[in-house]
Amino acid sequence: MSDDRMTLFELKEKAKWSSDPEEKKAAIKELSTHGENAISELQEIMSITAYEDIKNACAEAIKSMRTRNNVEVNETYATDSSSNSAADVVATKDQKKEKFEKEAKSA
């Protein structure tokens, strides 16, 4: 398991099982810094927790990551003068996803 995957797992477990609500929220906030890689972990936390504040923290983290990701894709599109269509932007995003998946398999 790669270091990044291990970190995601540890943060997810802390957010799910810690007895301290503030520690849970801190783990969720940290997960949100890992971008799209952490969305499934945040969704899992949301599905098992009974606490509305934890569910809300997860929902906000996911919303924040998706907003940041859209800005990142739009900035890539805006700064890449050779890209002339939205399809080029989607291809760039897909390439990032493929690269991540390859790295995950090789780790």
Image (spheres, rainbow, N blue to C red):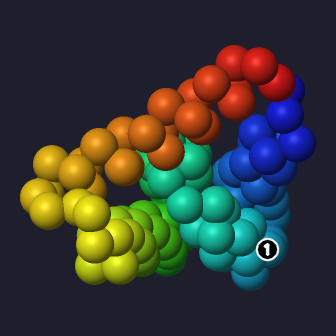
- The image quadrant of residue 103 is top right
- Residue 55 pos. (x, y %): 45, 65
Total marks placed? 1
Nearest to the observer: residue 55 or residue 2: 2
Residue visible at 36% across and 40% down in the picture: 94
Q: Residue at x 71, y 70 (%)?
A: 30
User: Front-most of 9 and 91?
Assistant: 91
Residue type at mark 1: give it.
Answer: Glu
Residue 66 point in image, percent of width and height:
36, 66
Front residue of this view, candidates 37 and 46: 37
Tell me which corner region of the image, top left, top right, bottom left or bottom right, holds residue 76: bottom left
- Mark yes or no: residue 80 visible: yes
In the displayed structure, 98 sits above or below 12; it is: above
Q: Vertically, is 98 above or below 94?
A: above
Asked whether residue 52 is in view, the answer is: no
Q: Nearer the viewer, residue 3 or 16?
A: 3
Q: Percent position (x, y) of residue 57?
A: 50, 74
Residue reaching furthest to the top: 105
Residue positioned 35% across, 79% down in the render? 79
Neighbour class for label 1 at 10 Å: few (<14), some, many (≥20)?
some
The residue beneath circle 1 is: 23
Q: Position of residue 22 (x, y in %)?
A: 74, 80
